[in-house]
Amino acid sequence: MTEKTSTLLQRVGPHEEWTVELTWFGEERQGPGKLVIRPTDPTNHPQAGLSHTVLREVDFTKALEEMRDADEFVLKIGPSINWDTIGSELVELSAAGVSDEYLARLSQAYCATGGEKPLHYLAGITDKTPAAIKNHLWQATRKGLLIRSPGRRGGQLTEKTAELLERVRESRGVLDAKSVSVSVKRRRNT
C-alpha cells in the first residue's frame, strides 16, 4: 500500500518564473515534508537565479490552509497521474509496442508509486510480470527517460521525459500549463 501524498503547486517571482512544489506525506497537516523550487519553464532559467526575495514569496500559511481544507489527499506527481486509470493506459500503450511514450508513462508511475515492491504493484495494474516491468524500466533508463539508483526503489524523471509527456499532453489537448509538475534531475556531464 502506498503512503498518501499530496502535492500543492505555487507560482512565485515577479513573472511567476518559479514553481514551488510543497509535498505532504501521510495524514500530516503541519508543514510540508518536502519543498522543491524549480524554474516554471525548464528550458528558460531565470537570469537572476533564485533569490531570498523569491523565497519569501512562498506562502506556507496559504498552502497549509488549502491542505487542511481538502477532504482527502490526492497523489499528484508529474502531469496528471490518475491511479484509477493508469494501469489500463499502460496496457493500451504497451499493446502497440514498447514506445517512448509507454516508457515515459511507466517511468512516471514508477517514480510516483513509492511504498514497498513498486515493480509488483506496477505488474499488478498492467497485467505484466515484475520481470517485464523491470526490463521496461531498464529500457527507459537506457533511453534517458529515467534515472535510477542501483539497489534502491524509485527514481527521477529526466528533462527528456518531462518534454515528451508535455508534447503528448499538448497533442491530445489536455495540457494545462498552470498545473504541469514534473520533478526532473539533470545528469552532470563530467
Image (cartoon, grey):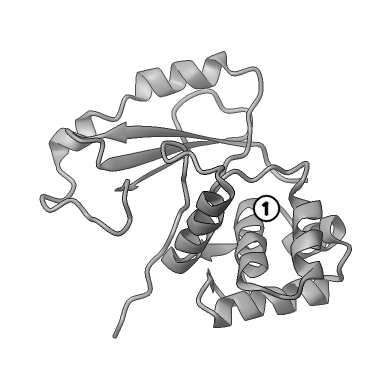
Seen from the viewer's position, the closer of residues 85 and 3 is 85
Q: Is residue 6 visible?
A: yes
Say if 154 sits above or below 8 in the image: below
Q: What element does badge 1 sit on?
A: helix
- Check disc 1 and give the amino acid type: Thr
User: Residue at point 24% right, 56% down?
Assistant: 44
Say if 173 sits above or below 90 in the image: above
- Which quadrant: the C terminus? bottom left
Residue 162 at what x, y percent from top left?
47, 59
Seen from the viewer's position, the closer of residues 79 and 173 is 173
User: Residue at point 65% right, 17% down?
Assistant: 71
User: Residue at point 33% right, 76% down?
Assistant: 188
- For this orientation, the residue located farthest to the bottom is 190
- For this orientation, the residue located farthest to the left is 48
Seen from the viewer's position, the closer of residues 94 and 115 is 94
User: Residue at point 15% right, 51% down?
Assistant: 49
Q: Mark 1 points at which residue?
A: 113
121 relative to 165 in the view: left or right: right
Seen from the viewer's position, the closer of residues 141 and 118 is 141
140 relative to 135 in the view: left or right: left
Residue 150 at what x, y percent from top left?
59, 77
* Total number of numbered discs in the rendering: 1
Q: Is residue 117 visible?
A: no
Residue 142: quadrant of the picture? bottom right
Residue 7 at what x, y percent from top left?
51, 36
Specify few, some or many for label 1: CA neighbours under 10 Å numbering under 14, 14-19, or 20 or more: many
